[in-house]
Image (tube, grey):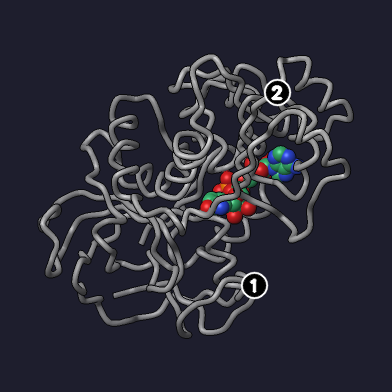
Amino acid sequence: MRAVRFHEHGGPEVLTVDEVDEPEPEHGQVVVDVEAAGVNPVDTYFREGAYPVPHLPFIGGGDLAGTVAEVGPGVDQFAVGDRVFGTGLGNGMPGSYAEAAAAPADYLAHLPEEIDFEAAAALGTVSATAWQALVHHAQAEPTENVLVHGGSGGVGHVAIQLAETMGTHVHATASPEHFETLSDLGAERVFDYSRDDLEDAVVGAGGADVVVDLHMDQYLQFNADVANPGARVVGIGNDTAEGGFDNIGVTKGKEIQYQFMSLFNADDIGAVLARVADLAASGELEAVVHETYDFEEAGEAQRAVLEDSFVGKLVLVP
Ligand SMILES: NC(=O)c1ccc[n+]([C@@H]2O[C@H](COP(=O)([O-])OP(=O)(O)OC[C@H]3O[C@@H](n4cnc5c(N)ncnc54)[C@H](OP(=O)(O)O)[C@@H]3O)[C@@H](O)[C@H]2O)c1
C-alpha cells in the first residue's frame, strides 16, 4: 500500500510517498481502509522532530476516516465494513497518512451515513480538543461568555460551534476576512486579533467567563485582564515556547482557574467522538474542509496548515 513517510526529520520536503507493508491489527486494534486523513499542526511537530517518533522512516498523521477492513482480538464494538473516524494515531504508533492504518479501537467512533469521509477526517483532533476544553475542563454553562482565540483555525471553528450548541455567548479572535464565516458558524462577536484596543473591545463585550486559548504564549496576561471573576482559561496551543504574565496579581483577585491540556492525555477519545458524531449528524457541528490534497501534496498541505490563513481544515486523500 502507499503511505506518506519521513525518513529523516526536517521541513515539508522530507515527506515522500512510499510503498509499504499493510498493517496487521494488534490486540484491541482494527485496521481501517483510510478514505481521508486530517492535517493538523501537530503532524508537523512529529515531522520536524520536536515531538518524538519511535523509529524512522515513520508514517505521520493523527486523524482518519474510512472503513474497517480487519478486526483484531479483543475488539467487539466494530465489525468489518463499519464506517469509522478517529484521532490519536502517529503518537508512538504509525499514523494515518496511508491507504490503511491500524488504530486502537478506543480511538475511533462509528461514522453516521450523513457525514462524508473528508469531513469526518477533519473532525478528529479538533473536535475532541474542543470538547475536552469546553465540556471536560471549562464546564462552560449556558449564557456564559466564551472567548476563542484563533477562531478561524481547525480547533477554533469547531469550538465556536460547540460553545454555541452549549448555549453560551461565543466571542472569538480572528483575521477580519473570516468574520462573516465565523458569525455564520455561531460567533456573536469576532474581534480582529491585531487591533490595538483588543482588550477594551473584549471587556466592552462583557469579558470572558471561559477562554479557549490556542495561542497561549501571546495571551496569558490578556486572558487574565479580560477574565470575569471565576473564569476558566484552557491553554491548548502555543507558537513559541516562551510565555507568561506581566502582572499575576490580577489572577488572584478573580479566582481564575487555569488548565493546560494535551489531547494525548485524554482517555475517552472514542466516547467523545461518538458524541461529536451525534452533533455532526444532526447538523449542529461540522468541520469545514477548506481544501483536499492527494498524498503527493502532503508537504504542501503541512506547509499550508502552519502558514496560510483560512477557515477550517485541510485533508489528505489517498
Ligand atoms: N494541546 C492539545 O491537545 C492541542 C490539540 C489541538 C491543537 N493544538 C494546538 O493548538 C494550536 C491551534 O491548532 P489548530 O489546529 O486550530 O491550528 P490552525 O488550524 O493552524 O489555526 C490557527 C489559527 O490561529 C489564528 N491565529 C494566528 N495568530 C493568532 C493570534 N495572534 N490571535 C488569534 N488567532 C491567531 C490563525 O489565523 P490566521 O491564519 O488568519 O492568522 C489560524 O486560523 C496549534 O498550536 C496546535 O498545535 C493543541
Q: Which residue is mark 2?
A: 228
Element class at badge 2: strand
Marks 1,2: beta carbons within 8 A: no
Residue 73 placement: quadrant: bottom left
Q: Residues within 10 Å of mark 2 (few under 14, many from 20)?
A: some
Image quarter (top left, top right, bottom left or bottom right) of the N terminus? bottom left
**Closer-to-camera residue (154/243):** 243
Would residue 18 be seen by someone viewing this image from the given angle?
Answer: yes
Residue 48 placement: quadrant: bottom right
Residue 111 point in image, percent of width and height:
24, 43
Residue 110 point in image, percent of width and height:
22, 45
Tag shown at residue 11: 1
Residue 56 point in image, percent of width and height:
48, 85
Residue at image point 35% right, 68% down? 98
Is the residue at mark 2 in contact range of ligand 1, meaning its CB lies under 8 Å from it?
Answer: no
Element class at badge 1: loop
Residue at image point 27% right, 68% down? 102
Tag shown at residue 216: none
- Is residue 86 shown above or below 98? above
Task: Using the numbered discs, state the Cα–Cα distance from disc 1 to disc 2 in whole angstroms.
Answer: 42 Å
Image quarter (top left, top right, bottom left or bottom right) of the C terminus? bottom left
Would residue 309 be seen by someone viewing this image from the given angle?
Answer: no
Question: Type of residue at label 2?
Answer: Asn
Mark 1 or mark 2, whichever is nearer to me: 2
Left or right relative to 303: residue 128: left
Residue at image point 54% right, 42% down? 155
Question: Type of residue at label 1?
Answer: Gly
**Closer-to-camera residue (71/254):** 254
Left or right relative to 249: residue 299: left
> How many marks are shown on the rendered structure?
2
Residue at image point 45% right, 39% down? 136
